[in-house]
Amino acid sequence: MRERSTHPATLAVFVALSAAANAQGPFADPEIVTDEAGGPWSVCAADLDGDGDTDVLCASFHDGEIGWFENAGGTFGPLQLVSDETPGAWSVFAADLDGDGDTDVLSASGLDDTVGWHENLTGGAFAPRAVISDRTDGAVCVHAADLDGDGDPDVLSASLFDHTLAWYENLGGGSFGPQRIITTDARGARSVVAADLDGDGDADVLCASEIDHTLAWFENLGGSFASERVITDHAHGARCVQAGDVDGDGDLDVLLAATLDETVAWYPNHGGGLFGAAQPIGTGLAGIGAVCGADFDGDGDLDVAAGANHPGTIAETSWFANLGAGSFGPRQAIGGGALGLWSADLDLDGDLDLVSASPLDDRIATHENLMQPCVEGRRYCTAAPNSAGGGTLLLTAGRASLTHNDLVLDAVGGVAGELALFFYGSGRQETPFGDGLLCVGGTVLRLNPPAAFDAFGDLSRPLDLDAPPADAGPGHVTALSTWHFQLWYRDPGGGGSGFNLSDALEFTFCP
């Protein structure tokens, strides 16, 4: 609902705003990189040729290949082989293993029980595999992280058939030490990552094992590891694990995809490595096998993508928006099945896209993120001096997010006791008006009622996106819409017009 202005000179400013444009879907349809990958189970993204963009790397189980696809501005070239001699290639990871400044390739191949690495020679050409260990019965997952605190990435492996987690010390220059066992009791180990779970500054080990339905972690004691600490042993078919700060409290929580439960869930870290019970994110996800946490909608918290791939079912990649403090919105389909997921800015537009690997149809695909990043109060226009001093500036608290709905507009440097009124519009301009500049263009709406500056010249206005005029009609603030905000205020002792204006802020609102 529109209301009248409190000053005749501003009547031309406060008029109805045309409806904001409808937002696009959150992700584009899958773009096929290849559909001839030979059973790809694992995918990751890294700059393999040193040209500044993010390429795609995959491991294909059936054809025993490790390969990569060059990024050519968000589209991808043909397969370039790293190796075709990695039988049962199950997992791939990218890291600078020899410390020469480029990105090497780490692989796990289950049919020859081998963890190995491939040196990046230059520009994405790779040396033959150098074996780190061939004593991993059913090598299924590899990861790289500095486990001994000496500044270089060590190698971490999970092997399915001998139920083993192990690590291999990086000795420098691409040489690795012998296998060092963390446990031989992770029955059906499928996924392993390193993360500082207890907040003591070193990288602990986190594992999902599907036969014993267990999610567990192992405390890093300085390069050796403590006994298993079980987070849960009721995650049926525990398949894929990741760590991230889900609830925004500063420590690392745990994300898990459990195939038999058809569930993706998170486990809150209560501090010191103590974890709470499972908090379901999505259920009824037939064939669920991959999870990936990333801030897809640009609002500062960790959203979750989940991949599923199962014959005879409609198995799609999905994502769930984090609504704050670890509460999640409903499942939103992205499209295409997946048992491998990775997030990266593939098209260099500032948001995180997805890469997926689907072994059932031999596909590697990318999923472009269409959710432009939120703009959290981009300042423009100059505040003119007023009778109180240098001019009135706008500040903010909260987030430009429809879900959180906690954005607050603050004005400082105003004229104590004088009436003021926030307003917003679809466009921007810089036109002389009163004693200042009118910075909001297009059709404009007021945020009534007016209010007076306090004795310090400050004024605060919570912006309720569920209330008029922002909730419906011409002023409706929708996801991905951009709006411009300014403050009009009385200033009888100013430059002669009797009123002035603040500077202005531009917001693009997240879902």
Image (tube, rainbow, N blue to C red):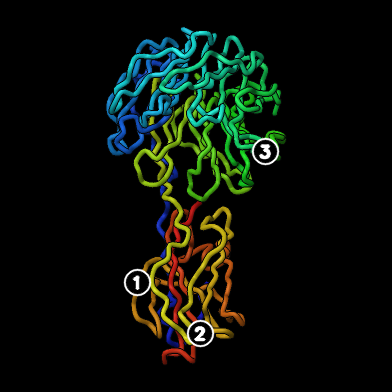
Q: Which residue is mark 2?
A: 388
For mark 2, does the 10 Å Cα neighbourhood hold few (<14), some (14 to 19), or many (20 or more) residues?
some
Residue 46 in sight in this render = yes
Residue type for callout 1: Gln
The mark nearer the N terminus, 3 or 2, is 3
Is disc 2 placed on a helix, strand or loop? Answer: loop
Residue under the point 43% across and 21% down? 106
| Mark 3 vs mark 2, CA separation in Å | 50 Å
Residue 314 in sight in this render = no
Report which quarter residue 320 is drawn in: top right
For mark 1, does the 10 Å Cα neighbourhood hold few (<14), some (14 to 19), or many (20 or more) residues?
some
Residue under the point 61% across and 46% down? 248
The mark nearer the N terminus, 1 or 2, is 2
| Mark 3 vs mark 1, CA separation in Å | 47 Å
Q: Position of residue 299 (x, y in %)?
A: 51, 50
Q: Position of residue 372 (x, y in %)?
A: 41, 50
Disc 1 and disc 2 in contact, CB within 8 angstroms: no
Drawn side of residue 348 relative to residue 158, left or right: left
The mark nearer the N terminus, 3 or 1, is 3
Residue 359 is marked as none
Q: Give the total of numbered labels.
A: 3
Q: Which residue is mark 1?
A: 429
For mark 3, does the 10 Å Cα neighbourhood hold few (<14), some (14 to 19), or many (20 or more) residues?
many
| Mark 1 vs mark 2, CA separation in Å | 25 Å
Q: Which residue is mark 3?
A: 268
Q: Front-most of 192 and 341?
A: 192
Q: Position of residue 56 (x, y in %)?
A: 37, 29
Q: From the viewer's perspective, is the residue at label 1 or at label 2 nearer?
A: 2
Disc 3 and disc 2 in contact, CB within 8 angstroms: no
For residue 246, above or below residue 310: below
Residue type for callout 3: Pro
Residue under the point 38% across and 19% down? 118
